[in-house]
């Protein structure tokens, strides 16, 4: 398989910020519970499914019943919390999502974003109500994200895939950002730690930080069948600048779900420890998740 690279938010996420991008301030994860009177068999099935309930300091909650049972309802972190509301659309299967991020200190609204989801279950439009920027999403074969364009602008992000030699499945290879001056950033993704090392199946897909998409919303199609383990950002045109480099060391349990993530970032580039940043996050999954 080809080497794959990834890139991050560090190198000027200007395009992505434009492209992609009630207030119960309670962070304590409620005791595990089950719905006493499930309205139908579908709700019962969804309630039994496994969900990520904690990642590092983030606590994730879900809707417990109705049309959107099992969909994320709230994400709480150290300084902010984000709520998610859902509305059925006019087209069967279509709907919209509104996410609102609040500051914990005073419950002030920090950011509000609306997403339009089509009948294929993928986002076609993102309206950042805070900045009033609208991004349009284009897909290949209906659900493979191919391009994000900023409405009224030449800014865009193009998603390039390769076919993995070991599985024959598509995997995100690069994201190329450009504006009216041409391409200015390239993000490359790697799915192993080097030649001869193993890939790790992605049993619970979360949007990678370098896509600048909401991490917990599975509305942008599948990017890969395995977990991203490395990433690199290259400024364009490249004239020997630094290439921020990332490594992601996942520990998986016997069921293939992540237990922990050791994230390492090298701002100067691969092989340079100056300014190196590290963080470790623990994951918790449960079939008895908290929610509303």
Image (spheres, helix red, strand yellow):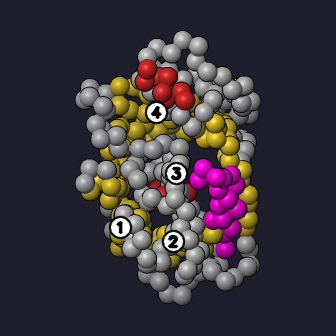
Dot 2 lies on which element? Answer: strand
Dot 4 lies on which element? Answer: strand
User: For the image shown, how many numbered marks are present on the structure?
Assistant: 4
Q: Please name the residue that numbered disc 3 is placed on.
A: 203
Q: Residue 152 or 165: which is nearer the viewer?
A: 165
Q: Residues within 10 Å of mark 3 (few under 14, many from 20)?
A: few
The span shown in magenta is: 248-266
Q: Alpha-carbon distance for marks 2 and 3? A: 17 Å
- The residue positioned 61% from the left and 70% from the top of the image is 246
The mark that comes first in sequence, 2 or 3, is 2
Q: Alpha-carbon distance for marks 4 and 2? A: 32 Å
> Where the C terminus falls, by quadrant?
top right
Circles 4 and 1: CB atoms closer than 8 Å? no
Q: Using the image, determine if residue 200 lies above or below residue 256.
A: below
Q: Using the image, determine if residue 70 lies above or below residue 58.
A: above
Q: Please name the residue that numbered disc 2 is placed on.
A: 190
Q: Alpha-carbon distance for marks 1 and 3? A: 17 Å
Q: Is residue 75 visible?
A: no
Q: Please name the residue that numbered disc 1 is placed on.
A: 168
The mark that comes first in sequence, 4 or 3, is 4
């Amino acid at each position: 398989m080809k080497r794959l690279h990834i890139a991050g938010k560090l190198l000027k996420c200007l395009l992505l910020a434009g492209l992609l991008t009630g207030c119960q301030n309670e962070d304590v994860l409620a005791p595990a519970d089950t719905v006493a009177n499930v309205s139908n068999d579908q709700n019962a099935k969804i309630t039994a499914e496994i969900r990520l309930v904690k990642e590092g300091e983030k606590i994730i909650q879900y809707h417990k019943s109705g049309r959107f049972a099992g969909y994320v309802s709230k994400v709480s972190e150290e300084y902010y919390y984000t709520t998610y509301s859902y509305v059925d659309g006019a087209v069967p299967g279509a709907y919209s999502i509104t996410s609102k991020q609040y500051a914990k200190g005073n419950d002030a609204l920090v950011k509000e974003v609306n997403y339009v989801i089509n009948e294929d279950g993928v986002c076609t439009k993102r309206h950042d109500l805070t900045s009033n920027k609208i991004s349009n999403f284009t897909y290949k074969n209906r659900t493979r994200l191919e391009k994000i364009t900023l409405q009224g602008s030449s800014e865009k992000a193009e998603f390039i895939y390769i076919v993995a030699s070991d599985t024959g499945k598509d995997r995100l290879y690069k994201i190329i950002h450009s504006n009216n001056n041409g391409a200015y950033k390239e993000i490359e993704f790697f799915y192993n730690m080097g030649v001869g090392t193993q890939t790790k199946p992605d049993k619970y897909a979360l949007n990678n930080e370098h896509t600048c998409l909401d991490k917990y919303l599975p509305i942008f199609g599948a990017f890969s069948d395995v977990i991203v383990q490395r990433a690199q950002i290259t400024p364009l045109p490249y004239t020997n600048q630094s290439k921020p480099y990332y490594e992601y060391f996942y520990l998986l349990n016997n069921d293939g779900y992540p237990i922990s993530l050791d994230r390492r970032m090298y701002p100067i580039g691969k092989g340079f420890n100056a300014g190196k940043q590290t963080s470790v996050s623990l994951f918790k999954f449960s079939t008895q998740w908290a929610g509303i």
